[in-house]
Amino acid sequence: MDELVFLKLGGSVITDKARPETARPQVIAALAGEVAQALAERPGLKLVLGHGSGSFGHVVARRYGTRQGVSSPEGWWGFAQVAAVAARLNRLVADTFLAAGVPVWTLPPSALARCRSGALISLETAPVEAALAHGLTPLLYGDVALDDELGGTIVSTEEVLAWLARRLHPVRIVLVGEVDGVFEGDPLRHSSARPVPQISAANWAQVRERLGGSSTPDVTGGMRAKVEAMVHLVREQPGLRVHLISGKRAGALQRALRGEETAGGTVIWGM
Ligand code: IPE
């Protein structure tokens, strides 16, 4: 039976967030290899793949304030620059996955999405469904988008995947980041930050208080915003499980794609 899983490769893992426009090609290739293996061993597995922008889009978007809106000629120039830099990283990701044998087809959210006041109000779903029906892996990413109130803005990969999840109902969403899931505090700054293996209705209020933002440029709100978006989604779709794992531990992605929660990190469920 077909099993639909959404996967996001975070900008924190596929780029060096501390250095502008610096990708991590070996990390991307290793993750592509794990995805290719998971697809080969599970014929029913269908994936919607997304990736963040890390030191590509976030740096330029912050320079031009693109998330807050676009109106001046300089702002629209910035909008085009953010689109270009996000697409440049996407090309690298797409080519790496194709080389690994994963049949990805890029669908740029900037061409599919419309926002109002920074929130997604529509996203063309038919091309994503057509890709899946034809055995392709649709590939989306954090991108610029037109906005009815703000002119232009930025949509994060989580916002795009959450929109698609409400229509396509994946069984699982796997989010791959630099750190091993959710911590109480910022594990990159404080080695004493404690990991949170599970988030459910029982501990969410307590975990939420201690969630960190981001220590590097992040125009879409860092870990706090990503986890909040996923908690909302799990509340709406009670069967859904969201698994946040590290992209730095070999084999973790493959295990998470199989649905094994021994892959470490954090599982969000039962909200
Ligand atoms: C950000 O997308 C998009 C741009 C800044 C263009 P994400 O929010 O999905 O990216 P990461 O994972 O935080 O890098």
Image: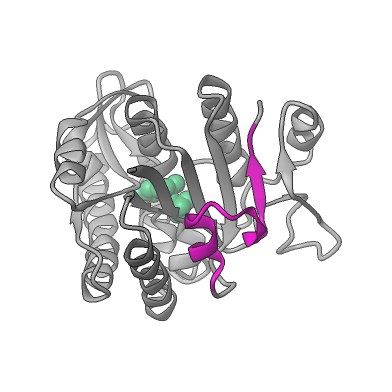
Residue 216 higher or lower than 232, as above or below: below
202 left or right of 43 in image: right
* Image coords of residue 176 (percent x, y): 51, 57
In the image, farthest residue toward the bottom: 26
Question: Could you say which is closer to the camera, residue 210 or residue 103?
Answer: 103
Question: Going 40% across and 51% down the picture, which residue do you hit?
Answer: 63
- Quarter occupied by the N terminus: top left
The reply to whether the magenta stretch includes residue 266 is yes
Instruction: Name the residue at 52% across, 33% down.
Output: 240
Q: Residue at x 57, y 64 (%)?
A: 178
Highlighted range, magenta: 251-269
Q: How is the image coloured?
A: one colour
Q: Nearer the viewer, residue 243 or 61?
A: 243
In the displayed structure, 91 sits above or below 143; it is: below
Where does the image place residue 123, in percent across and percent down from the top left?
Answer: 24, 29
Query: Splitting the image into 4 quarters, where does residue 118 fall?
Result: top left
Task: Name the side, left or right, on which 26 lies relative to 248.
Answer: left
